[in-house]
Image (tube, helix red, strand yellow):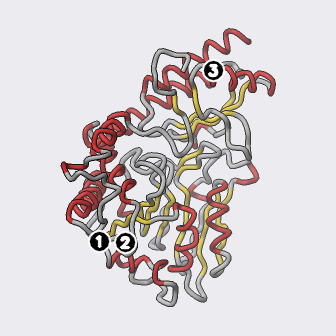
Amino acid sequence: MSHSNPRAFNFNAGPSALPLDVLEKAQQELVNFQGTGMSIMEMSHRGAIFETVHNEAISRLRKLYDIPENFEVLFLQGGASLQFTMIPMNFLQAGKKASYIMTGVWSEKAYKEATLFGEPVQIASTKEDKYSHIPSLDEIEVDSDDAYVHITSNNTIYGTQWSEFPDTKGVPLIADMSSDIMSKPVDVSKFAMIYAGAQKNLGPSGVTVVIIRKDFLAKANTEIPTILKYSTHVESNSLYNTPPTFGIYMLGEVLKWIEDKGGLTAIAKQNEEKAKLIYDVIDHSNGFYTGHASKESRSLMNITFRVADEALEKQFLSEAKDAGFIGLNGHRSVGGCRASTYNAVPLETCKALADFMLAFQVKHQ
């Protein structure tokens, strides 16, 4: 690193920054967890020590997210991508339709998988506008007979985020919250199911969190493979097969870190402050930087923008990398720049990027 901090200015979109405190604790416990003479990765997932770690992580998640008792919490594998398949496999019954609201690449992938199991319908989409905004609530019409409605709460590639969720009038609402879970308080009771890969806000890659309402779970199809039934994992407390033990341990430590930071209200406040630092530079740059997302749909997790011209943009990314900024290239499908400011990205890191952007503009305008 060319700057004085030995840690990179990490804006990776995922896997992404983890809290330094958590990494250092894991480092201390790596070879001898709680005096056992073993790493958490070396011990039985059915032993008492790991069972305590596992259950404490579930308990912390319930408490921090204020998850009602009529919901199950699961730790699964396969990422959000497997959930794209498991959801219609379990809940898209014969003769039913499922509604998908299209806000980006991950919505498209979820919809594509659903076509293999039934009849999904795109009830709203902003694709014609290059996914630069979230559909307005008044243009979303839900059929009361639908099996479920699926949304992606935050769109990493395009930098948009739902600020208010649609009222589905009793139709089960499912949200892929992979890139903004635990970034702010959420009323879990509004959803039938929330799912998220851990690798952005909750820990390392390899763990997928599923929060699912019991009455919705009871409607699941039964003639499907055992390991792909949510009920299988509920009945075994997510231990039907060997879980990603280290990832669950790390997830639990990240949840402790969120508690120590003051919970989700405090985390949300800092996330707003972090994003504002960078958005203010974009908004006051007189067109030198331009944001992709409409202001009313801007994400607090993924800030997407372009630099004045293509040559300058390449130079910006090159100089930023030399200065210790990692992960600022936009997704390969859209190009440009992207700063992912997930929970564990420090305020100071965002301030450093804002200062770099200002200095680059002064130098090249």
Other-residue count near label 3 (Cα within 10 Å), few / some / many at <14 / 14–19 / ≥20: few
Q: Nearer the viewer, mark 2 or mark 3?
A: 3
Q: Residue at x 72, y 44 (%)?
A: 332
- Helix, strand or loop at mark 1: loop
**Residue at which label 3 appears:** 322
| Quadrant of the rendered image containing residue 358 | top right
Q: Position of residue 291 (x, y in %)?
A: 66, 33
Q: Please state which of residues 165 and 15 is positioned toward the viewer in this rendering.
A: 15
Q: Amino acid at mark 2?
A: Arg
Q: CA distance from mark 2 to mark 3?
A: 48 Å
Residues at marks 1 and 2 touching, judged by CB atoms closer than 8 Å: yes
* Vertical relation: 300 (above or below) 239: above
Q: Residue at x 39, y 83 (%)?
A: 218
Q: CA distance from mark 1 to mark 2?
A: 6 Å
Which label belongs to residue 363? none
- Helix, strand or loop at mark 2: strand
Say left or right for 301 vs 75.
right
* Vertical relation: 162 (above or below) 345: below
**Residue at which label 2 appears:** 213
Q: CA distance from mark 3 to mark 1?
A: 50 Å
Q: Amino acid at mark 1?
A: Asn
Q: Position of residue 283 (x, y in %)?
A: 61, 24
Residues at marks 3 and 1 touching, judged by CB atoms closer than 8 Å: no
**Residue at which label 1 appears:** 70
Say left or right for 319 vs 207.
right
Q: Please state which of residues 249 and 162 is positioned toward the viewer in this rendering.
A: 249
Other-residue count near label 1 (Cα within 10 Å), few / some / many at <14 / 14–19 / ≥20: few
Q: Position of residue 324 (x, y in %)?
A: 56, 23
